[in-house]
């Protein structure tokens, strides 16, 4: 039952992913969440995120931002790099993930979804039969009050960490950054 919430991989952050390894595995496109995946909730992009997108595009990756945010928020976020996006997506509904795959112009088996929330990003990817990476949400280590959903995620991730699926995460980590 909980497997629908299990990511294929669980990593520290978007910068610790070995994108070359993913390409070797046959992936060509990335669907990424914004808030708490790439930047803290509501923040503009950073130089590091801008550089990551420029690097990904120079490697040949197709990218798409899939967000429940409005158009103005996403346009502001992607001011320094060009990428496709879907605003007010309605995650975790699989239709928005299918639409994203169509916009990217690749096969579903060539898409990797990257996000920070088990109950939206990962569930949506699973419901759309897409591979997915869960990153620790930005603010994971802060001693701030966390919502009910984040506490429920801890339960899911405890079960995930004790499953055989969890062991594959090191495979896609950047070796000198893990």
Image: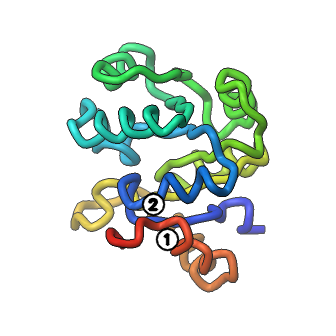
Residue at position x 45%, y 26% in the image: 69
C-beta proximity under 8 Å, tags 1 and 2: yes
Residue at position x 73%, y 60% in the image: 4
Residue 147 shows in the view: yes
Q: What element carries label 2?
A: helix
**Which residue bears the numbered disc 2?**
150
Residue 47: mark: none
Q: Is residue 133 shown above or below 1?
A: above
Residue 97, given in percent of the width and then of the height, sits at 68, 34
Residue 66 shows in the view: no
Q: In this view, does 86 lie to the left or right of 55?
A: right
Q: In this view, does 31 lie to the left or right of 48?
A: right
Residue 177, given in percent of the width and then of the height, sits at 33, 69
Query: Splitting the image into 4 quarters, where does residue 54 fall?
Result: top left
Front residue of 173 and 156: 173
Query: Splitting the image into 4 quarters, where does residue 79 fall?
Result: top left
**Which residue bears the numbered disc 1?**
154
Query: Splitting the image into 4 quarters, where does residue 80 fall?
Result: top left
């Amino acid at each position: 039952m909980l497997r629908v919430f299990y990511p294929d991989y669980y990593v520290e952050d978007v910068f610790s992913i070995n994108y070359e390894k993913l390409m070797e595995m046959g992936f060509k496109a990335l669907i990424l969440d914004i808030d708490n995946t790439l930047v803290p909730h509501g923040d503009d992009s950073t130089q590091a995120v801008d550089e990551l997108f420029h690097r990904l595009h120079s490697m040949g990756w197709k990218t798409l931002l899939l967000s429940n945010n409005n158009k103005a928020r996403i346009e502001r976020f992607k001011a320094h790099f060009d990428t496709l996006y879907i605003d007010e997506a309605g995650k975790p509904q699989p239709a928005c993930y299918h639409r994203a795959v169509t916009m990217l112009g690749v096969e579903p088996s060539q898409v990797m979804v990257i996000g920070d929330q088990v109950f939206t990003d990962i569930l949506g990817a699973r419901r759309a039969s897409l591979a997915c990476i869960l990153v620790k949400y930005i603010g994971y280590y802060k001693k701030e009050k966390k919502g009910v959903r984040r506490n429920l995620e801890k339960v899911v991730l405890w079960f995930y960490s004790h499953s055989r699926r969890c062991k594959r995460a090191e495979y896609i980590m950047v070796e000198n950054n893990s």
